Amino acid sequence: MIRKLLIRDLTLRDGQQSAFATRMSQKQIDRVLPFYKEAGFYAMEIWGGAVPDSIMRYLEEDPWERLEKIKVAVGDASKLAALSRGRNLFGYNPYPDKLIKGFCRNSIESGLDIMRIFDALNDVENIKSTVRYVKRFGGMADCAVCYTIDPYHSAVERIVAALHGHPLHKPVFTNEYFLNKALQMVALGADMITIKDMSGLIPPGRSAEMVRLFKKHLKVPVDFHTHCTPGYGLASVLAAIVNGVDIVDTNIWYFAGGTAAPAVELVYVFCKKMGIELDINMEAIARINAHLLDIRKELSAFDMAKQLPKPFNPLTDRIPNEIDRFFNDAIDAARKDKEDDLLLFCRAIEEYFDFPEPDELVKKAQIPGGMYTNMVAQLKQLGQSDLLEKAMSLIPRVRMDAGLPPLVTPTSQIIGAQAVSCALDQLKGRPMYSNPSNQFIALVKGEYGKTPVPVDPEFRLKITGSRDEVPYDPSDYEMQENPLVEEMETRLAENEKEILLLELFPMMAHNFLSKKKHVHVTT
């Protein structure tokens, strides 16, 4: 029996968000949609994440219209998918069930098929409501386990900590930890489980172990998602495929590699050699790619890599023998769990095609690329760029103090900003945490959910004024003000969809709706 591998295309959401700061306009998307209808991807991720905020903020476009227009163009040819941050939805704060319910219902009514749901703390309680409502309204719940790693501590740091009576913790983020989270999600009703490596930090050996473990114990399909930033992406995707993963996330050629996911064209070459059927139309994908080249040039001001890969169409272009041999050697290394060889061969393939080199700073720092660039920008703004190394060195301590949260939006930004603040405290001779941010206080208090490691009550007292954990209380939520429009006898947000935008993105939605309707509002 021929094995089939499903492909989730990320190009129109995570791809353009990772590589081009979510600046792809509806007009640009419209140019490729006819070919997407023919491409035959299992799913297309096109919404959620930063899209609703960014397209209002920068493009003055309606997020609901984007979803609805793509649905009209693609129909049922591919499932449409979105990314949700669980109780945080597409924003950065926890929201009550009535808003989660409204977003899920309107998303599915507007054409969404799959909601990928994750929580920044891997707190399964925080995804319960979204899973329930997505399934109630006829969607599929794709529950994502956020991959992260334990902080690195040198042998000297471990000895010093032990001598002071504060031995460093044993590893928390084991394969069993991730499997346990996945099993809890399946018990909630997850229709599939995604291993979500938002930072590209999962090496191929770990990818292989986790896929084998998940396939052994889970009765639902397993999806693998990673990025290429530190150089593991292609090798880790190949390791996942060799070890039986059901779905992999990819981008189309000119939107692939670098800070984004690996290219579907390279996955196609690997799968053809292994006799794995992808069931996608590579001719249609090549037509999409021709338009993506033009669109990438149009987005050059936001291009993270500034480096185009060589043109390549696996249906028509011959791969030189020495490079073709690297594909065969990579497959052999993946099958034999030879991680170093696998990385070597995949990197050689990427070099040949001129994909960006691994980001060694991100690899060494073991933090997401976006978190690193945010810290650099924050210090530059403060005129303290020389403090970067010190701030980076404080991340493990700040993270441990806060309960060891995974580093993914929004916790990555919270920890990074607080590490910068602590570095400034030390520079000025003040105690660390002299200026905790409101978000850091909320994290330590417990408002974002349960952290992987309990926060020390004495530290919580220092930061929040109380030893007690205080979880998020939805009864305290106050709806945003919906101002009166002067020229019309109505409110700025006239329907449920507009009200939902106003709730999640108060300033952005206020500005967007005002410009859209060409109105002045009064409070």
Image (cartoon, rainbow, N blue to C red):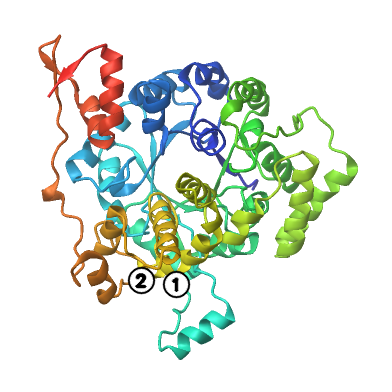
Q: Which residue is mark 1?
A: 172
Q: Residue furthest front?
A: 428
Quadrant in which residue 51 is drawn: top left
- 441 up-or-down from 159: above or below: above
Task: Answer with left or right where residue 454 lies relative to residue 54.
Answer: left
Return the x and y of residue 195 as percentages of the image width and height. Answer: 49, 54
Q: Which mark is residue 453?
A: 2
Compared across the picture, whether 75 is left or right of 339 comes to left
Disc 1 residue type (three-letter): Val
Residue type, mark 2 in image = Val
Secondary structure of the residue carrying tag 2 is: loop
Q: What x and y, as percent, mark residue 164?
A: 43, 88
Residue 452 seen anywhere in this rendered image of the structure: no
Give how far across and how far down residue 492 sits, in percent. Answer: 18, 20
Q: Residues within 10 Å of mark 1 (few under 14, many from 20)?
A: some
Residue drawn at point x = 51 percent, y = 34 percent: 21
Left or right relative to 481: residue 257: right
Residue 258 located left or right of residue 340? left
Q: Earlier in the sequence, mark 1 or mark 2?
A: 1
Could you tell me if the residues under marks 1 and 2 are in contact, i.e. CB atoms within 8 Å? yes
In the rendered image, which quarter contains the C terminus? top left
